[in-house]
Image: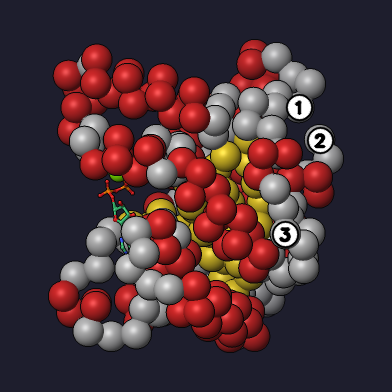
Amino acid sequence: MQLDRYRVPPGQRVRLSNWPTDDDGGLSKAEGEALLPDLQQRLANLQERLYAESQQALLIVLQARDAGGKDGTVKHVIGAFNPSGVQVSNFKVPTEEERAHDFLWRIHRQTPRLGMIGVFNRSQYEDVLVTRVHHLIDDQTAQRRLKHICAFESLLTDSGTRIVKFYLHISPEEQKKRLEARLEDPSKHWKFNPGDLQERAHWDAYTAVYEDVLTTSTPAAPWYVVPADRKWFRNLLVSQILVQTLEEMNPQFPAPSFNAADLRIV
Ligand code: ATP
Ligand code: MG
């Protein structure tokens, strides 16, 4: 599959309405699902090398609208990695202490150390999304924050962290279906937040602020717009992009400090 077509070109402003939400890459669901186990094995092998090498880190940013599939992506894609080498951080409404600091303070504390994979389930980008839709900050502040985010991401890149950012792109119809499914199934009620319905009413405002966020795609920290109406395709595409990213990072097992041939275990 051609992965580049899902990457937001640096320096461009995309129109999300031109990006598909229901792409299937020309595959059937059965074909797509059949490709996943091999990718999961490759992800696990690459992660082991990353961990053993401990010279680089990978930061995966997940952003989506409500019911966009962040949790499902963590379960089905990130679940392929050895949990010891992964740290998942969920960013909620900032606490009082977090609000008493700059907006990147709580984010920086969760960045992965060398050898690790960090997953941000929501991220620094919330500070220029939900806050803008609800007019908690003005446009000038938002533009300044976007610059701070770019500078922060370059700092991480310079320090050995590769960044890959995913926007899970669903249609309003698909979100409606998923929210309805949560309402209908008592075992999913805990996932239902009546506040999500208010956010849904701001669909177009979110589209506009997401389009601003996607301008922060750079070669070192690219954004991918993942068609996410089909969960199997979302899992397949995210897995493929992560395999490609980790292969480019090319982590190597460190050379041993001993000669194995000289040693005998008695
Ligand atoms: P799910 O999609 O499964 O419901 P979730 O990520 O939405 O999970 P919630 O606890 O439902 O988790 O929501 C977290 C909320 O925190 C979201 O509404 C999000 O917009 C909000 N939030 C996160 N970061 C910020 C921020 N910096 N400023 C304001 N609100 C934020
Ligand atoms: Mg929620």
Q: Please, what is the three-letter code of the amino acid marked with disc 1?
A: Gly
Task: Give how far across and how far down residue 141 sits, in percent.
Answer: 46, 79
192 left or right of 61? left
Q: Is residue 123 above or below residue 187?
A: below
SS for callout 2: loop
Q: Which of the two residues, 241 or 209, is positioned nearer the viewer here?
A: 209
How many other residues sit within 10 Å of disc 1, few (<14), some (14-19) or many (≥20)? few
| CA gap, disc 1 and disc 3 | 24 Å
Marks 1 and 3, the one that precedes in the sequence? 3
Q: Residue at x 69, y 33 (%)?
A: 20
SS for callout 1: loop
- Inspect this view and state whether residue 40 appears: no
- Residue denoted by label 1: 25
- Residue denoted by label 3: 13
Q: Which of the two residues, 228 or 99, is positioned nearer the viewer here?
A: 99
**Is label 1 or label 3 in front?**
3
